Amino acid sequence: MELSKAFKKIKPLITKNYIMSLFDDCVKKLKEIIKHIYSYLPSGASKKIDDLYKKLDKVRAELNEAIAKLIKPVQDCMMLLLSVVVKLMAKAIDDAIPYIAELLNKPLVKKWLTSNKWHLIIIFFKRAMRAAKHTD
């Protein structure tokens, strides 16, 4: 099935690396702020700052584990939803073909389309319908 091959090639927008990079950016900004105010802090603050850095590293490790557990089900759900949407679109197009063909055969529509240089679309669509009938 070509559709399943296409879905395997689609890379989800939200990945573990993306989320971790956002967290790392926040930590980096926090460390920059601390660095700027470090000289104004009391002497005992350096120990507390070191503890803060250790806690941030621990939080990062926990976040990494949590994302690793959650990202696979989220990606699977996204792919399932995408496949359902594609199948519904294909069904809607298949259901619409007879109505489109009927519309194209109406004299007023033919006149409007040919007067606006759309006659090539009519020819293309009719050829596509004939080809579809031969492949069924």
Image (cartoon, rainbow, N blue to C red):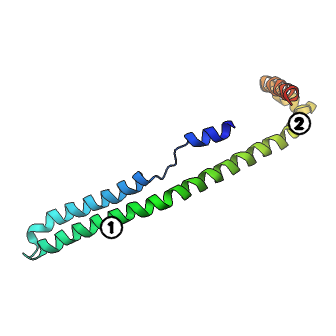
Q: Which residue in the protein does label 1 denote?
A: 59
Residue 44 lies, in percent from the top left, at: 9, 77
Reply above or below: 45 against 104: below
Q: Which residue in the protein does label 2 denote?
A: 103
Residue positioned most to the left: 43
**Quadrant in which the C terminus appears:** top right
Residue 119 lies, in percent from the top left, at: 81, 24
User: On residue 38, which mark appears?
Assistant: none
Q: Is residue 29 left or right of residue 136?
A: left
Circle 2: residue type: Leu
Question: In the image, what residue occupies the spot 28% across and 66% down?
Answer: 56
Disc 2 vs disc 1: which is toward the camera?
1
Dot 2 crowding, Cα within 10 Å, few <14, some 14–19, many 20+: few
Residue 6 lies, in percent from the top left, at: 61, 38
What SS does tag 2 mark? helix
Q: Nearer the viewer, residue 108 or 121?
A: 121
Q: Are marks 2 and 1 in contact (CB under 8 Å)?
A: no
Q: CA distance from mark 2 to mark 1?
A: 62 Å
Question: In the image, what residue occupies the spot 9% across and 71% down?
Answer: 40
Residue 57 found in image quarter: bottom left
Q: Nearer the viewer, residue 61 or 130?
A: 61
